Image: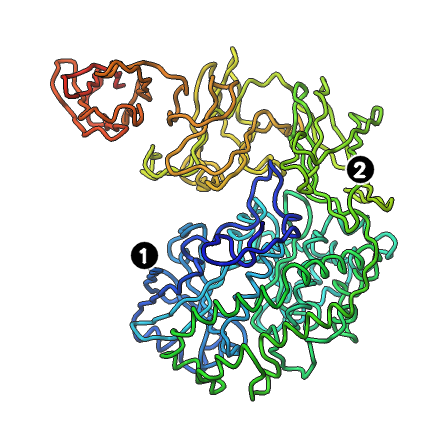
Amino acid sequence: MIPLFREKVKNFACFPLLLALLFFGAELAAQNLFPDLAPIYKDEVVARVDITLPPDSLAVILAPGNEQSDYHFHATFSFDNGTTQETFENVGFRLRGNTSRYSAKKSYKVSLNTYEPGRQWEGVEKLNLNGEHNDPTVSRAKVSWDLLRSMGVPAPRASHVEFYVNGEYFGLYANVEHIDEEFVESRFGNKDGNLYKCLYPADLKYLGSNPNLYKLMSGNRRVYDLKTNEAEDDYSDLAHFIDVLNNTPINDLRCELEPIFNINSFLLSMAYDILSGNWDGPLYNKNNFYLYHNQATGQFEYIPYDLDNTFGIDWFQIDWSTRNIYSWAHPNETRPLYWRILQVPEYRDRFSFYMNKIVQEVYTEAAMFDRLDEIKALIQPYLVADDYYTYDYGFDLQDFSDGFEESLPYFHTPVGFKPFISQRRTATLNQLDLNDIEPIVSQLTNNHPNEAQAVTIQAFIEDDQGVASVEVCYQLDGGSVNCTPLYDDGQHLDQDAGDGWYGAVIPALGQTGVLTYYVQATDLNGNDGREPVCGTREVFVGSAAVSLAINELMASNDATIADEQGEYDDWVEIYNLGNTSMYLGDRYLSDNPDNPTKWQFPDIWIEPGEFLLVWADDDVDQGELHAGFKLDADGDFVGIFDSDANGNGLIDGVDFGPIGADEARGRLPNGTGPFQAVNPTPGASNEPVAVLETPDGALVPYRIYPNPTRDLVYLQAGKALAEMREVLLLNALGQIVGRQEWKDQAIFDLSELPAGFYFLSLRHADGYQDLGRIVKE
């Protein structure tokens, strides 16, 4: 069951949406395309946001003539949703938007990192507070973003907030996630690709082969505005994409376009644009979208943007609720993202298949109306005192209520929110031209094997008539082609039986080399679908001689161990289980198997039997063992990958599920055993090093680590020692130099103590019990 609109379902109904599974990651997928709402976007409450800044700064921001200023004024930001309270000083605060800059109820941007570079909150650097001044229901954008996420399209998170500036109520606002490098990394597992913000008149028309031609200006900004890699300012990838989209013969377009564009995700976005009447996007108004060049796949990802002019908001006097879905885009101007793509018969049929699935399973009156009623009840109290709501068009509370049910007497509100949904759904069902589709093969993944490991292949398959068979065909270094079936039986690393995920396990190949493969599915009507549609995927099969292992990890380190900066960051422990020193400097650590070179180890060696701790904090400036990514406590992947010369083959990796705060997962025995819950021992063995006999005769393993140490030392034994009262730290003379109440663990800082021997002792009801010696270096 996939919840409609909500990532965390509490008292809201759930609705099935198998469609979204097309774009959820496979078992080894490194990133979650749909991160949870987090406190910032928790949407069952209306949070309070306060901005405090000097009155003269606010006066400058609001002064006529300054509407286009992007200067960030120094301010303090506070957030309170009833359970989470946060305050950040020295943030940047400015106007945002386009036409809304001239409205009475303006929109604002809060930047946490303008004056403190690198500062984030829950992975977010900037917040967009949108006034939604065109929308009498103040709900269309929120519903749009949630609908897209439920459809399987990576889209911003959003919630409603009550917004105050210097104590004055500025009104009910939409809090919408900013699209930037943090956004793309959280969705796609990388942020090194080019991210283009595409605004009017971004029609993707071919202008020529020179990349600089696409740096054209509109007013004081670029039409295709590069938001990352600005120093390089290289538009070659965009120029190539536009060339392929516009100039490839239709019969060849699939082979040329699919390696560089995520077509399935875009077809879903296109279905959303039509079902919501989003005329202010690329299809009609050549406006409001992002393109991100995903470095893991080589494909451009389409990301929708600015969705308030939807669900009946109209300035063209066009009936978007009944407009034909196959002739919906602007009829007289270049719109290759619509017209060229729908010229491909397979894409047209797939678009129709998606559209039908959405209107049958998601875009129903029962589901949509229930959600609208919930939002209406939640936010209505916050409009009572919202004077700014009334200023631009004269909206009042009756308009708010009526706007969900019927048209309003304003030029741009010819149809109500719910009537638009009913009319659009009816028209779509009448217009749909459904044909038998070929099986859709997507989310192709492999385990990046070495020569001694079995090769696992997974793919998600969907079809309108049912799947008859699936097979993977492969060859190593151009040798003979072999084919083996994929199964959806829950027995071939294919997740659950009957869920659309198919898997195959190919015996270890026994040699290194380049493995090329493709997956083909055949449906019950004999139609074939293939991924990739042309050519093959490839993966380097690495050597098994590298004796490195992911030995332990912690994805939510609240209080277990601090780094050199005193910060409690995620960590990964690397172990050399071999008999020789291993050079790490040409190898990599990554949380994305499709982007194996994400973080390169420093120029160091790891000795036999050594445990090396790497901080997964996405803060490489803090030291050479701080990796350029974080772990996701909701489930993630982390792996060691070989050198460039060896094709970046996977040396060792683990895919783990949800992990609680200060919980560790590790191998028992070290380096070779299966991953399981372990007592945290960062930088030390996972295997018990001592056994303590409790007063009642029980034998309890415990660990003291690291030992020797220069500063912190940890004692862990778990809840089995709950009857213990106190732990003492003694010097070589038996003098007590530290003591702590026993609470499942003890942490002593020896950094100010002289070098030498120290001892730990536990006190219980019957006396004391020595635990062992510590060497302070």
Q: What number is the disc on residue 469?
A: 2
Query: 762 or 13, which is in the foreground?
Result: 13
Q: Position of residue 283 (x, y in %)?
A: 71, 68
Q: What number is the disc on residue 173?
A: none
Based on the displayed image, in which of its 4 quarters is residue 289 positioned? bottom right
* Residue type beneath disc 2: Ser
Secondary structure beneath dot 1 equals strand
Q: Position of residue 690 (x, y in %)?
A: 32, 14
How many neighbours does mark 2 have within 10 angstroms: few (below 14), some (14-19), or many (20 or more)? some
Q: Position of residue 738 (x, y in %)?
A: 16, 26
In this figure, which colouring scheme has been used for the structure? Answer: rainbow
Query: Is 97 situated above or below 469?
Result: below
* Residue type beneath disc 1: Gln
Rendered residue at 45%/50% (across/down): 123
Rendered residue at 61%/49% (across/down): 193
Left-right relation of 472 to 387: right
Based on the displayed image, in which of its 4 quarters is residue 108 positioned? bottom left
Query: 334 or 533, which is in the foreground?
Result: 533
Marks 2 and 1, how far apart at CA: 53 Å
Residue bearing mark 1: 85
Secondary structure beneath dot 2 equals strand
Question: Which of the two discs, 2 and 1, labels the residue nearer the N terminus?
Answer: 1
The mark total stands at 2
